[in-house]
């Protein structure tokens, strides 16, 4: 019977090798301790305390989703729609806490994307000389 390395630890010569999920858990803990993650979570907490910021984000998101639905159903998105969306985004980004959050989230996403890229590179290079 085949035993997946994802679920079980494999023992070889008396040494327990880590499974893929164990490695993923370690990576998750490391990411959780990163400066980028902590700054994003701190910014998120500040954002939740700022009702104006929440309202601005909600307004922008509702407009964006509405226009996406319009586009998907074949309705034309006019320059006026785009201007309204741009104005909502500018208003949202003028809020200090929103700006801090989006910057922190962008930095964490960049770290996360770099980690994913490194994983992909090493998967593709496995077995190559």
Image (tube, rainbow, N blue to C red):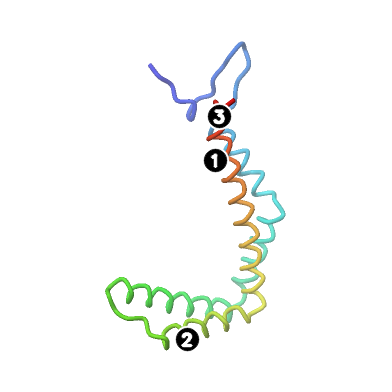
Q: Could you say which disc has been placed on residue 120 in the image?
A: 1
Q: Secondary structure at mark 3?
A: loop
Residue 8 % position (x, y): 50, 25
**Lower sequence index among marks 2 and 1:** 2
Q: Secondary structure at mark 1?
A: helix
**Lower sequence index among marks 3 and 2:** 2
Q: Residues within 10 Å of mark 2 (few under 14, many from 20)?
A: few
Which residue sits furthest bottom? 80
Q: In the image, is 77 to the left or to the right of 11? A: left
User: Label 2: which residue?
Assistant: 83
Residue 52 % position (x, y): 58, 81
Relative to 18, is 88 above or below?
A: below
The reply to whether the C-beta atoms of the residues labelled 3 and 1 are less than 8 Å apart is no
Residue 3 % position (x, y): 43, 21
Please identify the quadrant where the C terminus is shown: top right
Q: Secondary structure at mark 2?
A: helix
User: Label 3: which residue?
Assistant: 126
């Amino acid at each position: 019977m085949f035993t997946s390395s994802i679920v079980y630890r494999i023992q070889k010569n008396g040494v327990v090798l880590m499974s893929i999920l164990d490695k993923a858990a370690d990576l998750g803990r490391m990411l959780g301790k990163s400066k980028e993650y902590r700054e994003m979570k701190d910014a998120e907490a500040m954002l939740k305390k700022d009702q104006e910021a929440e309202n601005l984000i909600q307004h922008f998101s509702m407009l964006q989703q509405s226009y996406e639905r319009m586009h998907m159903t074949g309705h034309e998105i006019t320059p006026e729609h785009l201007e309204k969306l741009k104005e909502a985004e500018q208003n949202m980004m003028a809020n200090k806490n929103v700006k801090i959050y989006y910057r922190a989230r962008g930095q964490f996403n960049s770290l996360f994307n770099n980690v994913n890229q490194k994983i992909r590179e090493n998967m593709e290079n496995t077995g190559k000389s």
